[in-house]
Image (cartoon, helix red, strand yellow):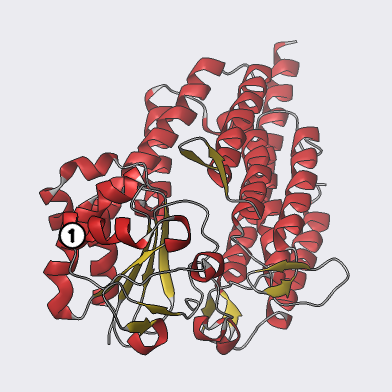
Amino acid sequence: MLKDKRRWTFLMTVVLASGIGWTFLSRIPATATNSSQQPASPRQGFTAPDFTLDLLGGGEITLSELRGKPVVVNLWASWCPPCRAEMPAIQKVYQDYQELGLVVLGVNTTNQDNEADAAAFVREYGLTFPIPLDRDGSVSARYQLRGLPTTFFIDRKGIIRSVVVGGPMSEAVIRSKVEGLLKETP
Amino acid sequence: MYPYLRLGPFLLQLPLLALLVGVWIGSALTEKEAARLKLPPAIVSNLIIVGLIAGVVGARLAYAARYLQAYLDNPLSLLALNVNTLAGFDGLLIGLVAGILYGQRKKLPLRPTLDALAPGLAAFMVALGVSHLLSGDAFGASADLPWSIYLWNEVRHPSQVYEILVALVILIIVYKRPLSQAGDGINFLMWVALSSAARIFLEAFRGDSLIWPGSFRAAQVVSLIILAITLYVMRIWARAQEAGVKHHEISEKGIL
């Protein structure tokens, strides 16, 4: 077929015309894949599932009320070695970027931990960011937690920009992800 | 979708495992094809390894370059086993350039080498589809069909299954080499053309398309351009091959 110029030209024309036609027919409005219109789901590009949880030490926090600020949600447990290994780096990055509006939520998976151990962990590492308590495991379920630690980097619009499952994350990894979020226009 | 498998304290990333299996099978097919085309299989195999290593290292360095201060403060983070800190497109370019440079240095002939790579690349595309199915990436648009799957809180086209099936068909075609057996680069170009055509068709069922002005899906437009160029080059290369064969025949007759 390749040796017959006319047949090849005809085939090329048919293939390309079909491709152009299909591309034209399958156009979609830009809003159809707009991230904010995607359902909430714990993956990159989707709106972060909302939650309201009690905080260690009193009070409560709602994720959706933090819109307008970049948020890092880190799910951890006091018995988990990689959680222990990465927590000082998270605290350091939080201290460095807190003034620029960064919020860190260290969600303790209390359903597989306990509050006394969580409190001791927070004291040991001198954590200053809020520690929501997932007592019934509902947030772990909503975020389809498959391993500890898991960290979600959420932009100012509430869209998940990156998910890191497992750890420990190095300070450079956390810093790069946070800087990416902070660079986005408020 | 089943992205992780817990093995004691380790969390095995199944999508990554699928890609590694794809590289392994792809390399084996490439070596076999290289031997058929009388290319040195070991050098062709090294070409793949050089491209892969340069691609991964390049992807990490390109990512680090964007956040230079963070990595200068903590250079050991360059070694982190974290796929989230790879700049994929940069890595692909760096891997390609490294592969081309290695091929030139080892004096590998371009077209037979490309043909040797074709079945391996086709097999890797099947593995890529499996990887997407396991991770839930490259997900489909919302669709309430009897064969729809529930993914990311919606009923969707099983776009990853479409991807695997089409990639399998392309693999079979490329393996059969219907247009050329000769190592003239046509089989590789056919793989590029079929893959581009498949992307144009399948992108319509995706729910994560990047949209360009005019509401066009970016992947379809890029694939159309690649398809047009590939079909044109196929004709040019086939003509050159034809001319070469005729020239050879005339020379032989002259000698006789």
Which residue sits furthest front? A116
Q: Position of residue A106 (x, y in %)?
A: 32, 66
**In which image quadrant can residue B157 be found?**
bottom right
Q: Which of these two is toward me, B252 or A36?
A: A36
Q: Decide if residue B108 is on the left or right side of residue B249.
A: left
| Residue at 38% over, 41% down | B56
Residue nearest the viewer, comparing A45 with B104:
A45
Residue, far right: B146
Q: Quadrant of the N terminus of chain B?
A: bottom right
Q: In the depicted view, which residue is nearer to us: A141 or B32?
A: A141
Horizontal side, residue A128 vs residue B27: left or right? left
- Check the picture and name the quadrant holding the C terminus of chain B: top right
In this rendering, the answer to whether B46 lies above or below B255 is below
Label 1 amino acid?
Arg
Q: Is residue B80 left or right of residue B45?
A: left
The residue singled out by tag 1 in the image is A123
Number of numbered discs visible in the structure rendering? 1
Quadrant of residue A72 within the rendered picture: bottom left
Q: Is residue B66 visible?
A: no
Up/down of B110 relative to A2, above or below: above
Please tell me which residue is depicted at 11% across the width and 50% down the height of the picture: B73
- For the point 63% across and 24% down, which residue is it? B28
- Across and down, in percent, residue B36 comes to 69, 19
**Which chain does tag 1 point to?**
A
Q: Position of residue A89 (x, y in %)?
A: 20, 55
Name the secondary structure under disc 1: helix
Residue B30: x, y in percent?
Answer: 62, 27
Instruction: Check the image and report above or below for B44 versus B64.
Output: above
